């Protein structure tokens, strides 16, 4: 019998992956998308263990990392989206012990959506519910054809679910709302693609709420009122609808109130759920873990004396770096020098920096200490939280002499 593995290429965490192993390496990957194949075959440029730019033993690097964090008054711990939940919990414990800032990429992407779900402000469902029940799927500011290549084929549009036996041909309607005609919009079709101007999402939502309320919507962006009324008719008839929220929508909204209003109205006239299109395989896991520990999903600073969590904009990685509030940083499974604005990230190059990652990246090249870790879901097992909030168990596929990120964080914590 074939053994199936979990792909950590994105937050879909597809669990039907088969692999061929040659020489203790993943040689061939079956069923995964192009992103998953690249992830599971490992790093093209593995990271080396270094201290001050020179090759070092792991024990030496761990001791130096512990020394840096011990000497810092306000360290930062950032990343986590590509770490197992077990490693994330170790990271939170380390932050609590050192009085550190701790944050992740959700601080400036899907965080507000995940937080609203955890606070029961937005109705949600699982991807399995979508596969088996959904007849209307809205991709809003999202292009899963490229960001999550198996989303449409495995869960949302093409599958034949228990209550959707006729699949996309007759049983499902895909709708795309975006600023451009994406590949997903092409699949939805011209009659189900609604192009809106940048920043027009909130007004489109208000117009749609009016239409769902039986009113003729008024818009300043010049939306086609007839098409909005037609869209509201489709949504009213939905037996089980889902909105897949992408970064295009998140970045457009200054606050989530328009989305709350739309979801409330949709659930007055139909049955609608929302799922955030999370990118990194365990970003949502970090949100869940920190929420369980502190009541917050990100942007936390631990008080070194009391262990209490302070939370707010000032505790975000962006503001902490912009204000030069931190004096050392540990980066795990992330590359902020490549992803954050230069005006913010350049300060990282001026302070002692520790990077834990399987692969070499720009941040690692400027780090005082680099510690290579096992690749999650391939060289190390553990658990992760899928984009819909479901916990998934990951099995190790091949052996490695590298420590897992959980083990590295545990040893750093013990050394402090």
Image: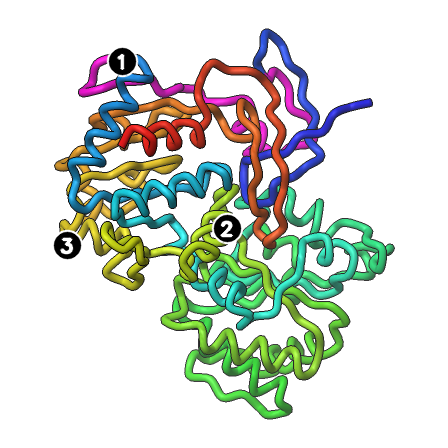
- Nearest to viewer (mark 1 / mark 2): 1
Rendered location of residue 220, percent (x, y): 42, 83
Q: Quadrant of residue 110?
A: bottom left
Task: Count neighbours of disc 2 (C-alpha within 10 A) and say few if under 14, some if 14 to 19, many if 20 or more.
Answer: many
- Name the N-terminal-most of marks 2 and 3: 2
Query: Which residue in the structure is indicated by mark 3?
Result: 323
Q: In this view, does 258 lie above or below 313?
A: below
Q: Are marks 2 and 3 in contact (CB under 8 Å)?
A: no
Query: Which residue in the structure is indicated by mark 2?
Result: 284
Q: Quadrant of residue 227?
A: bottom right
State the residue at coordinates (57%, 51%).
387
State the residue at coordinates (22%, 56%).
319
Query: CA–CA distance between discs 3 and 1?
Result: 33 Å
Determine whether the residue tagged by mark 2 lies in a helix, strand or loop.
helix
Q: Quadrant of residue 388?
A: bottom right
On screen, residue 371 versus residue 295, left or right, reads left
Residue 100 magenta-drawn? no
- Name the N-terminal-most of marks 3 and 1: 1
């Amino acid at each position: 019998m074939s053994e199936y593995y979990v792909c950590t290429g994105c937050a879909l965490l597809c669990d039907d992956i088969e692999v061929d192993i040659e020489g203790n390496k993943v040689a061939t990957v079956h069923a995964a998308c192009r992103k998953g194949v690249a992830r599971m075959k490992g790093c093209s440029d593995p990271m080396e263990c270094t201290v001050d730019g020179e090759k070092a033993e792991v024990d030496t690097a761990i001791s130096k990392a512990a020394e840096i964090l011990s000497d810092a008054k306000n360290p930062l711990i950032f990343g986590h989206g590509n770490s197992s939940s077990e490693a994330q919990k170790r990271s939170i414990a380390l932050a609590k012990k050192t009085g550190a800032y701790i944050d992740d990429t959700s601080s400036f992407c899907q965080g507000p959506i995940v937080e609203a779900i955890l606070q029961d402000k937005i109705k949600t469902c699982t991807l399995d519910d979508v596969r088996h029940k959904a007849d209307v799927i809205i991709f809003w500011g999202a292009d899963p054809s490229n960001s999550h290549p198996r989303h449409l084929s495995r869960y949302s549009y093409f599958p034949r679910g228990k209550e959707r036996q006729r699949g996309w041909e007759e049983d499902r309607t895909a709708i795309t709302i975006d600023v451009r005609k994406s590949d997903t919009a092409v699949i939805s079709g011209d009659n189900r693609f609604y192009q809106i101007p940048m920043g027009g999402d909130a007004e489109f939502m208000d117009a749609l709420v009016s239409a769902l309320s039986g009113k003729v919507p008024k818009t300043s962006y010049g939306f086609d009122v007839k098409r909005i009324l037609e869209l509201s008719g489709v949504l009213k008839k939905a037996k089980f609808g889902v909105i897949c929220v992408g970064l295009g929508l998140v970045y457009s909204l200054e606050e989530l109130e328009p989305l709350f209003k739309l979801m409330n109205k949709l659930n007055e006239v139909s049955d609608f759920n929302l799922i955030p299109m999370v990118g990194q395989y365990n970003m949502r896991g970090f949100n869940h873990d920190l929420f369980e520990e502190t009541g917050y999903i990100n942007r936390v600073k631990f008080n070194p004396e009391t262990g209490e969590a302070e939370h707010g904009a000032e505790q975000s990685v962006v503001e902490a770096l912009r204000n030069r509030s931190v004096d050392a940083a540990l980066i795990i499974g992330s590359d902020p020098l490549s992803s954050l604005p230069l005006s913010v990230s350049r300060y990282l190059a001026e302070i002692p920096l520790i990077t834990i990652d399987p692969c070499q990246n720009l941040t690692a090249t400027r780090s005082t200490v680099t510690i290579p870790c096992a690749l999650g879901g391939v060289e190390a097992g553990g658990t992760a939280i899928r984009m819909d909030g479901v916990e998934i168990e990951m099995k190790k596929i091949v052996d490695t002499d590298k420590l897992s990120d959980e083990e590295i964080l545990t040893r750093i914590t013990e050394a402090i």
